[in-house]
Amino acid sequence: MADKVALVTGAGTGIGRAVALAFLKAGYATVLAGRRMAPLDETAAMVPGSKSLGVMTDVTDAAQVRALFAKAKSAFGRLDVLFNNAGIGAPPMALEDIPLEKWRACVDTNLTGPFLCTQEAIKIMKDQSPRGGRIINNGSISAHVPRPNSAPYTATKHAVTGLTKSTALDGRKYDIACGQIDIGNAETPMTARFAEGLPQAHGAVAVEPTMDVQNVADAVMYMASRPLDANVLFLTVTATKMPFVGRG
């Protein structure tokens, strides 16, 4: 994969870090984007001798996103894979009580951020030689069903599915494939509270099983490794015993 270049947003922690490490270990030159530089440096240092570039970026800022992709192209000359991973949640609360600023923060990060990154990725991918590339969006099982009191996050993840489909359609003419991975309960710092129990649809609180985040990294690498005449449009990977399939 010496000639391949990947860019991962939210690469300093959790799923983003696990996926970035997988790209680095596979030999991709990897651009690591995130809001804080120190975690990006830590991610890069975990694979000594790898080729990486850390760029402090707020994906909600169009100018910063443009600068990120310009630096990626300047450093490595092309872009083969974009993993749109950066995202946030909102405090769990009744829908009617959610502050507008919390709604907007979710929309800006989880939807506008991937949109801006997708625009810049397409601009590079359609004009490079060999032409084309792959964009992978981090959806969520919330792109299928909501958790209680999660309207901002759930709405943005449903919207990401629309962005995925539109990108897959509009990218065809440029040999750009786009797919989405929907993840359920990967073990990261963000899911540590799952061990204490989460509200369920029927009103009870229950502990939810998690899975090793490496399962997510492996799934993303499978998607990324397909030739451009094949596309994994949607892939769902969940903890086997989590309450996703079934009634609750």
Image (cartoon, helix red, strand yellow):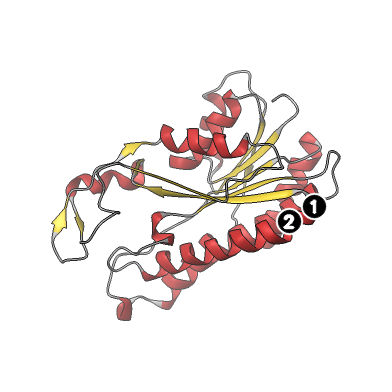
User: Residue flagged by tag 2: what amino acid is it?
Assistant: Gly
Binning the other alpha carbons within 10 Å of mark 2 as few (below 14), some (14 to 19) or many (20 upward) gives: many
Q: Position of residue 203 (x, y in %)?
A: 15, 66
Quarter in which the C terminus is drawn:
bottom left
Q: Rounded to the nearest whole Å, what is the CA distance between mark 2 and mark 1?
A: 5 Å
Q: Position of residue 189 (x, y in %)?
A: 35, 42
Q: Is residue 240 above or below residue 155?
A: above
| View extreme (top): residue | 49
Q: Secondary structure at mark 1?
A: helix
- Residue 98 is left or right of residue 139, and the answer is left
User: Which residue is drawn at the image coordinates 33% and 64% (left, top)?
Assistant: 91
Q: Is residue 32 above or below residue 138?
A: above
User: Residue flagged by tag 1: what amino acid is it?
Assistant: Tyr
Residue identifier under label 1: 174
Residue identifier under label 2: 171
User: Which residue is drawn at the image coordinates 28% and 70% (left, top)?
Assistant: 93
Q: Position of residue 18 (x, y in %)?
A: 48, 34
Q: Secondary structure at mark 2?
A: loop
Residue 38 visible in the snapshot: no
